[in-house]
Image (tube, grey):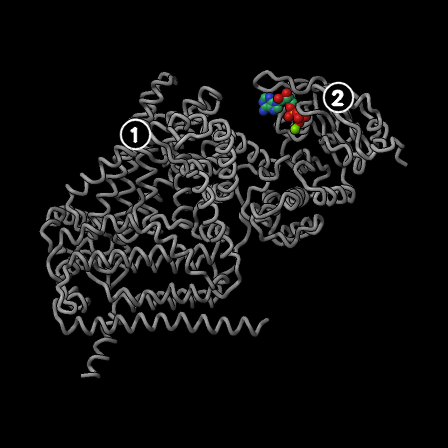
Amino acid sequence: MIIMTNIMESLYNIRILDELAEKRTVIHNIHPLIKLLTTIAYVIITVSFGKYELSNLLPLLFYPIVIITLAEIPVIPILKRILVVLPFIIGIGVFNPLFDPEPMLVFLGLQISGGWVSFLSIIIKGFLTLLAALILISTTGMTWIASALRLLRIPRLFVLQLLLTYRYISVIMEEAGRTWNAYMLRAPGQQGVSFKISGPLAGQLLMRTYDRAQRVYQAMSLRGFIGEYNPGEVKKVTVKDCLFLGGWVAFFSVCRYINLPALIGSVVTGVMT
Amino acid sequence: MSHHIVDFIDTYFTYPDQTQAVKGITLCISHGESVAIVGANGAGKSSLLKLLTGICLPTKGEIRIGETPVTKKTLPIIRQKIGFTFQDPDDQLFMTTVYDDVAFGPRNYGIGEPEVEKRVMKALETVGAVHLKDRAPYKLSGGEKRAAAIAAVLSMEPDILVMDEPSAALDPRARRRLINLLRSFMHTKIVATHDLDMVLETCDRTIVLKEGKVVCDGSSTTILANEELLEQCGLEKPLALQNCPRCGAKKE
Amino acid sequence: MHMADALLSPVVGGTMWAATAGVAAYSIKKVQTDLDEQKIPLMGVMGAFVFAAQMINFTIPATGSSGHIGGGMLLAILLGPYAGFLTMASILTIQALFFADGGLLALGSNIFNLGFFTCFIAYPLIYKRILRNGYFSGRILTGAILAAILGLQLGAFSVVLETLLSGKTELPFSTFVMLMQPIHLAIGVVEGMVTAAIVGFVWKERPEIIEKAALGETLGSISIKKVLAVLTIVAVLTGGVFSWFASSNPDGLEWSMFKTSGVEELKAQDGIHQTLSSIQEKIAFLPDYSFKAKENETNTKATEAVAAAWPAVDAGTSVAGLVGALITLLFAGLIGLSIHLIKKRNNARAV
Ligand SMILES: Nc1ncnc2c1ncn2[C@@H]1O[C@H](COP(=O)(O)OP(=O)(O)O)[C@@H](O)[C@H]1O
Ligand SMILES: [Mg+2]
């Protein structure tokens, strides 16, 4: 059934990223806050490119390629995930060729309209930014992201709640699977889920979730929780970490202000003629 | 002045929906005792433990831990003395790594991070779970979860260890390890369970509950051999004390 | 519907982040003054519940529509607006990280679009008002459906505005609106019906869960005035933050907001662009800001021509650009390959 596959797929997706985050590579050892900041810089610079810029964007590929190989991240599951999400971006971007037919560049004698250029530009940007987010989580892991958030002065209350949600996703999803199975055993042969079942089906689950939340609260308060959460100490940012951030931001800036491919291209074609 | 570490004085408890779960229980437990609370489902074992830890407060009667009565005001003190493990370890392992979970209690009491680390490692060593420290709870087996949950309360260095059905849902090997672990604790132990074989191995004293009342309180070996009494309370004589099923010969 | 990084400009994305941060900070303050620490695990575990509930695709008979809930309305009903908003923020953060839903820059917009409008507009102004005199099944249904529809309509409209202000799409405003609003009407109906079914069921079985949520809300009735006041403060703050941001970057990120794309259809927005930039000029507290913005505006045409060597109707530069692009790609691939090989050898040696 769809629900079960949905649940299995989501859990699998989370677990695979969790497992990647447990590796110990140069990239994994970099301070979580530094990785978060580098990712933010990357995303901002990527989307700051003009809407007709294409070749300019390509050098930005260096970042994901270098990190992915250094961190030994398998490419296929990551690409798969992005392919699932890209359609929405494509759905909005695909209107650009329709509404912007003015020719913009000539390629092999073919006139290409501005709309196609900007459409392609959106897709590349979408690909790069989503890739950056997945790389961040698969080299850092949720626990360390949370500690980076603490360093950014995000209130502890929110960080704790974020961690709790993340922690209980697998527990509640498995419970959802069991509730679903119990339903299907008593109502076999039903196609799809009519919203009428949503009351009892999701409602049961919700009530059990509520009870669990109460037990979790009890467990927390038995161990001295009174509304404050102390996340412990986070490791210090080292010089190496700063160099990582500085180096990448410098590289991104170069990519942003100097059209490297055009430069290389004109040098190469200039030499050839 | 009482020298008991736990004192229930004619305690009653009724849930908001009017279920009377505990109906006039009086009992006392001394330092270093290992006590099993046994009884069928719904006998009131969990409710009794909830009263002991102050999760629920008695509707009538009094409970004392050492010199301190359990009231809303004294909860912080009470809770430092008692380590309670829940029936479902998933309720208790609420952090994203085992280490953070075991450190949660000590950190809440404002202990410095170096001392927290010492305590966490000591607790993990005690339960043999040091290698699990960076794991996410959902990746642990049932036995490992149980061990982590116990470490999470040991790190608070409690005087009394209270457990609700610790051997439920464990496979034989994990159960065996749990039993060995429990035997090695010098703490005052209070264990609610229907695993009577485990009781025989880990607890000197047994309290039998039925419908919210104490039916019997005494040495485990005597009580657990009393087939008639156990039957009345919806329990079964431990396998270790049953006659050989083939020849009917008595064990030992 | 999730907004995506690629459709946002840094300024719009950043502004939405600031707005979200403002609302979140306010909500945290509110939840904290509630002094009900029991609510924290409830928020956390309920977030996980919504995550699971989103997996279930429901079909609405006779309409042919099906979908899953977003959960914003359910969270507002169960936890109240403040805790509901924060929980929604957690869910969306996890989705952005683990499922690449939208991306990190767009996360601010997504939290705002899916959390703010449901929790702070639709819930107090519609749902609470309809159920003011107590819970009845009929009212739950009406309240949930109307509130879900309003929340999603506002959220969808917000997506339209953010995308257009970012200047990445050529979609005319009217077409975009005609595309987004009706789809979200259907989504809103599904959300409302499923939410009502869940709330109705739980209310019948365990009324205390629903009642407690309603009672625990110390500031249950949010007035429109308050909401507007918060919005204004957030807007002023974000304006301030971003004018500072702009002027502290001497070269200026190329703000697509200030770019006139030259395409007829986008003319309509110029009005908005101008107002926005004039507002930002007024609240700028670093003197050289307005100079910067003007310069940006006048120079965009020129810089675009210079900076973007490839996109220009000139066969010569196109060839150079193409060659350069290919070399870049090749080089990137080679770097990846060589790191991979070196790693492999090192690992082999280590073993
Ligand atoms: N949260 C609750 N609300 C109402 N009744 C409860 C609750 N928890 C337990 N009970 C009832 O209290 C009685 C004792 O339950 P419990 O202490 O859990 O027994 P045991 O742990 O021995 O199985 C049972 O009748 C049970 O149904
Ligand atoms: Mg029980």
Looking at the image, residue B105 sits to the left or right of residue C277; the answer is right
Looking at the image, residue C315 sits to the left or right of residue B77; the answer is left
State ligand 1's quadrant: top right
Residue at the outermost left position: C264
Q: On what subunit does the disc labeled 2 rest? A: B
- Residue B114 can be seen in this image: yes
Q: Secondary structure at mark 1?
A: helix
Q: Quadrant of the C terminus of chain A?
A: bottom left
Residue nearest the observer in this picture, B96 or B200? B200
Q: Quadrant of the N terminus of chain A?
A: top left
The residue sitting at 74% across, 43% down in the picture is B176
Q: Position of residue C203 (x, y in %)?
A: 44, 21
- Please state which amino acid type lies under the numbered disc 2: Cys
Q: Position of residue C204 (x, y in %)?
A: 45, 19
Name the residue that disc number 1 marks.
C189
Q: Which numbered disc covers residue B50?
A: none
Query: Which quadrant of the view contains residue A77?
Result: bottom left
The residue sitting at 32% across, 41% down in the picture is C112
Name the residue that disc number 2 marks.
B233
Number of marks in the image? 2
- Please state which amino acid type lies under the numbered disc 1: Val
Q: On what subunit does the disc labeled 1 rest? A: C
Using the numbered discs, state the Cα–Cα distance from disc 1 to disc 2 in whole angstroms.
54 Å
Residue nearest the observer in this picture, A239 or C9? C9
Q: Secondary structure at mark 2?
A: loop
